[in-house]
Image: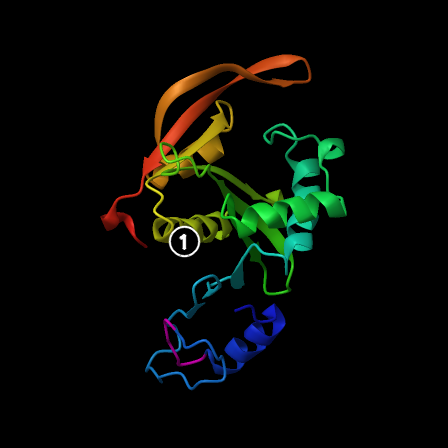
């Protein structure tokens, strides 16, 4: 069930001091158990939504659906312009037409695509993660990932939260392997993936051409074992 982000934020801001609760029932007006320390963290979640309090700000993750598909394309427009040397599409290649949105919603409903969007406490969408897989019996255990965060929000834990959300959801779908590719010169991203258990298993030689320069990528994977749950 989807709740308006601002409603969640206001509820939490009113009750956060001195409280900690995880696995809150779906109705957000339920009472939270009182705890002694006001420094405890707060997490809201159901099957698709998370609300995290960090030292810097509240971070909200909402599962991608027809309700927020326009937010996905909004954050894509920003990221395509900021990070065009690292992402596959140039800004002018992004198709955000109504037809494309409907096609993506169709794929989401069929579980070909699973995604999450992360928001700031000002309801600004600042990043996304997409997991894509085929339903063919021999390869349906593999999910291919794309993670992107607006550059001004690097280092605030948004990517961690997105990956956490998708991993938990993917396990429920029976996914066993995450796969992705990353440019060899994108050191920040490579270090992030290694930190979260991804391993390099090959080179995609001259896989991308940026401004007439052929670039190679690392192929990376992660096995989703039962003990890896967040």
- Say above or below: 187 vs 22: above
Q: Name the residue under label 1.
A: 169
- Say above or below: 208 vs 51: above
Q: Is mark 1 on a helix, strand or loop?
A: helix
Quadrant assignment for the C terminus: bottom left
| Residue at (45% x, 32% y) in the render | 180
User: Which portion, as a residue range, is magenta?
Assistant: 17-23
Compared across the picture, whether 87 is left or right of 225 comes to: right
Q: Does the magenta stretch include residue 166?
A: no
Corner quadrant of residue 44: bottom left
| Residue at (36% x, 43% y) in the render | 175
Compared across the picture, whether 147 is left or right of 229 comes to: right
| Residue at (57% x, 71% y) in the render | 3
| Residue at (59% x, 30% y) in the render | 86
The percent position of residue 114, horizontal first and vertical second, equals 50, 48
The percent position of residue 227, horizontal first and vertical second, equals 23, 49
Closer-to-camera residue (215/38) = 215
- Say above or below: 92 vs 39: above
Closer-to-camera residue (100/20) = 100
């Amino acid at each position: 069930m989807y709740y308006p982000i601002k409603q969640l934020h206001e509820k939490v801001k009113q009750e956060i001091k001195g409280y900690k609760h995880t696995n809150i029932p779906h109705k957000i007006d339920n009472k939270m158990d009182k705890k002694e320390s006001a420094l405890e963290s707060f997490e809201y979640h159901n099957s698709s939504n998370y609300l995290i309090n960090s030292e810097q700000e509240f971070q909200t993750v909402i599962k991608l659906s027809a309700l927020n598909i326009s937010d996905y394309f909004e954050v894509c427009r920003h990221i395509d312009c900021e990070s065009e040397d690292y992402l596959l599409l140039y800004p002018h290649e992004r198709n955000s037409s109504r037809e494309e949105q409907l096609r993506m919603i169709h794929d989401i409903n069929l579980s070909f695509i699973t995604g999450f969007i992360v928001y700031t406490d000002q309801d600004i969408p600042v990043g996304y993660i997409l997991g894509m897989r085929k339903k063919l019996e021999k390869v349906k255990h593999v999910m291919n990932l794309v993670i992107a965060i607006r550059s001004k929000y690097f280092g605030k834990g948004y990517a961690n939260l997105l990956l956490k959300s998708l991993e938990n959801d993917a396990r429920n779908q029976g996914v066993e392997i995450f796969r992705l590719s990353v440019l060899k010169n994108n050191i920040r991203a490579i270090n992030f993936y290694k930190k979260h258990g991804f391993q390099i298993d090959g080179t995609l030689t001259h896989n991308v051409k940026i401004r007439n320069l052929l670039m190679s990528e690392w192929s990376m994977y992660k096995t989703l074992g039962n003990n890896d749950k967040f």
